[in-house]
């Protein structure tokens, strides 16, 4: 059983702070969670000062602007002014402890016959794995049954000669949309690997 995932995060060369995580399992289950702490300083202030995150990640989050909720829509002027408000009524917005539990339950909630064989897959997955593992504290604190590493779709693509892959139609830097597209990439890479074999 493979689980494809993506995280959005703030990193400064020393720390990785989770913004959101999306997961898609081969059995059709999906998970999307946004860290409610990004609405609180100092994390909120740091994200607001990060122009790339404000332009590319924040617009895809569940946002509330004034009295008008705009899930995934934020004007570019808001990004340049450097502020955002999460829609705290969204079911996707939750504290890190709830995200940790949701991720644990998602991965370990796999069919028991397939659980020992669960694989995590991401695109350029090194930081994604750190962001996921840090939900549980240190890496040795990962729950029993949680994979200790993430397989990298980008590495598999390179192994197969860097073939062209399907383009993501929309939602780039939305963690759930990216996780869904990782599944699409994996299916394309699996088809190419089967032809090689």
Image (spheres, rainbow, N blue to C red):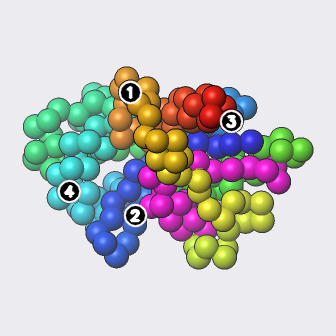
Nearer the camera: disc 3 or disc 1: 3
Whole-Å distance between the Cαs marked 4 and 3? 45 Å
Expressed as whole percent of the image width and height from the top left, the position of residue 41 reads 29, 64
Crowd band around label 4 with a 10 angstrom C-alpha radius: few (<14), some (14–19), many (20+):
some
Measured from the top left, where is residue 21 in percent x and y? 49, 48
Q: Which residue is drawn at 54% across and 68% down?
A: 134
Quadrant in which the C terminus is drawn: top right
Left/right placement of residue 131 relative to residue 111 reads left
Mark 3, residue position: 197
What kind of element bears circle 1?
loop
Mark 2, residues whose alpha carbon is within 10 Å: few (<14), some, or many (≥20)? some
In the rendered structure, find residue 167 and report the number of the disc placed on it: 1
Counting residues from the start of the chain, the first of labels 1 and 2 encountered is: 2
Label 3 element class: loop
Q: Vertically, is 182 above or below 148?
A: above
Q: Which of marks 3 and 1 is nearer the N terminus?
A: 1
Residue 17: numbered disc = 2
Residue 187: x, y in percent?
Answer: 59, 30
Query: In terms of secondary structure, where does tag 2 sit?
Result: strand
Q: Answer with mark 4 or mark 2, whichever residue precedes in sequence.
A: 2
- Give, as a single range, the part of the protein colored magenta: 115-136
Q: How far apart are marks 4 and 2 (CA)?
A: 13 Å
Q: Give above or below for 60 relative to 155.
A: above
Name the residue beneath numbered marker 4.
50
Q: Earlier in the sequence, mark 4 or mark 1?
A: 4
């Amino acid at each position: 059983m493979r689980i494809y995932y993506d995280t959005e995060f703030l990193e400064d060369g020393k720390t990785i702070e989770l913004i959101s995580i999306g997961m898609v399992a081969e059995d059709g289950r999906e998970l999307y969670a946004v860290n409610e702490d990004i609405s609180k300083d100092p994390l909120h202030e740091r994200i607001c000062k990060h122009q790339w995150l404000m332009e590319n990640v924040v617009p895809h989050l569940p946002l509330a602007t004034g009295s008008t909720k705009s899930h995934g829509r934020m004007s570019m002027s808001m990004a340049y002014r450097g502020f955002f408000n999460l829609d705290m009524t969204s079911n996707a917005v939750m504290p890190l402890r709830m995200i940790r539990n949701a991720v644990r339950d998602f991965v370990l909630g796999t069919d028991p016959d397939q659980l020992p064989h669960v694989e995590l897959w991401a695109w350029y997955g090194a930081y994604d794995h750190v962001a996921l593992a840090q939900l549980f504290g240190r890496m040795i604190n990962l729950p029993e049954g949680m994979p200790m590493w993430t397989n990298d779709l980008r590495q598999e693509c390179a192994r197969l000669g860097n073939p062209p892959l399907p383009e993501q139609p929309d939602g780039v830097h939305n963690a759930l949309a990216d996780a869904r597209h990782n599944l699409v990439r994996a299916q394309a890479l699996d088809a190419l690997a089967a032809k090689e074999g």
